[in-house]
Amino acid sequence: MDAVNELFNDLKSPDPTIRFSVLSRIEDMVWSDEHKKAFREIFAGEKDPGIRFHMQKVLARLDSGDKNRGSLATIEEQLKNPQRDEIDLALMLESVKRNEAAAVAESLRRAEWPKFSQQLLPSVLKFLKKYGSTEDTADIEKLCRHGDPRVLSSAIEALEKHNPERLKDLIVPLLINSNFGIRSRAVRLLHRWDPSEALRHFESMLFSSLENEKHAALYQAFFFPFKQIETLMLRYISVESDPEMIKKAGLIFMTNPERHMPARLLEVRQACVGIKQRLVDVILKGVLQSLYQAKIVNAAPDQMLQVLEAHFKEKRIRLFIEHHSNALKSPEAAIRLQSALKLGDLARRGMDEARQLVEAYLPRERDLNNVRKIRYFLETGQLELQKAPEPVQPITPPAPVEAKVAPKAAAKIDKPAVIAPEKIQEYSAKDRKSLIEAISTENYEQYMAIIRPVFADMDVNEQIAVIKRIERFGGQSDSELLIGCLPSDNVNILESAIEALSVINPEALHPYLPQLIKHRYDEVKLAAIKVFSLFDKKQAISLVENMLLSIKPAQRQTAIFCLGSFDYHSISQTLINAYKSENDSENLQQISSILRSNADEDSFFRIYVDYKACKSSKKEEYEKLCRELAQMIVEAEPGRTIESLFAAGEELVTEEERKKTERAAYKLEKIQKIRENVDKNVVLDASLVRFTVVAYAVGAVLTAMIWFLFLAPPPPTAPDAAPKAVKARKVMETISIKGRVVIADEKQRILAVETEPGKLYKMTLPENYGSMPKPGASFQAQIKAEKDGSGEIAAEFLTSF
Amino acid sequence: MSNFTVNIDKSNDIFIVRSSGYLDEGGGAAVFEAVHKNLPADCHKVILNLKDSPVINSQGIAQLIELSEIIVDDKGGELAFVGLSDLTYGVFKMVGLLQMGNPFESEAEAIEAMHQ
């Protein structure tokens, strides 16, 4: 591994703080001639004066090769010279001999070091961190409010060494610093004095809409005890869609292997698709590997993964059974019927528990239609048809195929004879059923070639059976057939088609999701949201949260069931909130069952706080739930007791109460308010920000459609017809642009850069930039501009490269 | 960690610390103590051989950062890391530990570099 080259890559980062941080790392490495050449090339392109200074320093050291030249005499000579060479002095300070260090520090004090240039100050502060004393703290403290992040971060480090308690008073200015690196450093400092408040700040940064802020939070995540942040990190990895961020977060999981983590990561993996699923899979396997290497578990990673996958499947089935067995008690006959059919389906696949539940329910069912339909389904595996089969929307038939199956004996023979597809219609329902049931991986293409041309003419039951075979054995080639089912009016066909498409080709569902999510059948809506969550979990959760606000208990029940299909940590708070607001006993039961199947300490404590705050008749139910959760936690961790968990819960409640009355200036809400005031020209709309931050390009379009069709509030009714000026909502962010200069106003130093046709960034270049670029020249810079703006976009120049 | 062990050794003017097992908070504290108690006052070169500690958690890393600051900043010494796994290399790079000491594949390489 070539560590120098790796670091050189970081030197090309558009973020100056990253480039600066790299410099201090590369100084002491072993350099080849090629490295030196590459470094000189990077230096030639560097525009930031602070970074240039430090690069010059590195080059000067490389050229001289002299590492021990910081003698007291030479430093004093430099300090007395007003025209001193600052690069030389910086190098000298880094190579002072220990026995002369105290005298050099004294010389620096006499030379009034705080008045030195901002380029030189980081080197002085670094020296004073090592060799300074408490008498320097007052001066260092003043620099902890410096505008240059390089000076500021060096000052913080020095003060942290000599008098960390003084940093306590600086927390607020550091937390509102515009540099996210400084903010995150402040959060880490705050953790020394107020861990729970620091974690609230950390959470706010981690779930920020700004990429740089999230990067800073992830970096600091390494310095927090993992136990304190693991729930946040799980939720983060579950909703994050930027691959680079996921990789960084993954490193934190792999570094901190915990026994219970793989099962939770597996849930996250199962709840996403595409590159994210692959990345989470790598993280999951990495954690398993770490557990094995750290000898926390004895099972090899592959072996453990198999067990986890089996457990995951069992857990899903258990939740499914619990949900539908609860729904059998519903006062609505239609709901009871749907759930009994779902359980009946499991029963027919050999699940005895499901059969027993249906058998126990049938004698209690007063709706005779339900009884008849369920019995018919249990016997035949088919839905009872009320009318002639309705044809679905015609689909484009595939090219005629020479089929090779004798349908009458399809289920029994291995090598079917050649028949024409249209002949299938002449066979009995029983034979057609046998044909469909005989579809397997081996004969899939052969059999489907016969079925595809006649699929549209099959009855509903047959179509559902075929769709289920496609889900199990099919591939993307059958997407078109399934999409042809989406205009169907039959809820069962629709639900099956969505579920099958979500397995074989979820991307193909994209254009249809906005309409399906608005569908009048909750089952369809639910299936569509589940697929949507694979692409944009945050928005999918918003959709479910909207459903949870419904006044109809049945619709809320559908939403709760939907929550059960998400990975638990992305929706645990939604569930806990739903438990708080829910009054329907069946729904409370459903929520409890999901909470119980994911019992962990974090959820227990959050529910415990709600339990203690509850003043209604629900208090008893809360207590019961807390006891059940505590029992399950204790079973998993034999060292704990229910009493100790309740006692810890009490402590937490007291702490929460204390925090409510506390007026600390660094409280997250106060800091957020100050930040808003500082940045008053920018109006951040949290929901809009959330909406705009989607990593997958295709997901962004889909999210936009769903937002406008479903989530967006209806346009306000204007009290009068006169048009009113609307204040534009802007989301500003730091971005890198590359384009061609089209306007360069030398006098006002205004520059306009076209990055793509119709997209023009207009900014003022500072004096220290030097001569203005000429029109037509290429221009690459880091700027602050309105996110997703178009046309002429006002921007703030940060740095060019 | 019951399975965690730390051994110390000396090769001329270089102090070598070899850890084995999961380096968590307890492991980090053991390494810290081993250096703190046994590092001779006149010895400023330290090699941390982490070959048999392929997993180091956040709290272990925090201990190593503290130790590195003492060796490099306070004592003005030199530090080398040996046998970093891909995982720990990535993490050390991210948290800035490679700023405090250079990584080497083997103790021999680290010793040679420290003698230069």
Image (cartoon, rainbow, N blue to C red):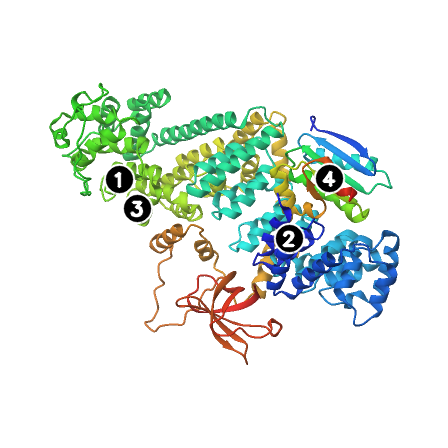
The subunit carrying tag 4 is B
Asked whether the residues under the numbered discs 4 and 1 touch, taking CB atoms below 8 Å apart as contact, a structural biologist would say no
Q: Which residue is mark 2?
A: A35
Label 3 environment density (alpha carbons within 10 Å; few <14, some 14–19, many ≥20):
many
Q: Which residue is mark 4?
A: B110
Label 4 environment density (alpha carbons within 10 Å; few <14, some 14–19, many ≥20):
many
Q: Residue furthest top?
A: A412
Question: Is circle 3 on the same chain as circle 4?
Answer: no
Picture residue at 41% right of the left edge, 35% below the top = A585
Residue A305's place in the image compared with A152, above or below, is above
Q: Amino acid at mark 3?
A: Leu
Question: Is circle 2 on the same chain as circle 3?
Answer: yes
| Side (left or right) of A695 relative to B3 | left
Question: Is circle 1 on the same chain as circle 2?
Answer: yes
Q: Looking at the figure, which quarter contains the N terminus of chain A?
A: top right
Q: How far apart, in angstroms, are the residues tagged by discs 3 and 4?
A: 63 Å
| Side (left or right) of B89 relative to A250 | right
Label 1, secondary structure: give it. Answer: helix
Q: Which residue is mark 3?
A: A516
Picture residue at 77% right of the left edge, 35% below the top = B16
Q: Which residue is mark 1?
A: A482
Q: Nearer the viewer, mark 2 or mark 3?
A: 2
Q: Nearer the viewer, mark 3 or mark 1?
A: 1
Picture residue at 81% right of the left edge, 48% below the top = B76
Residue A182 image point, x, y percent:
65, 56
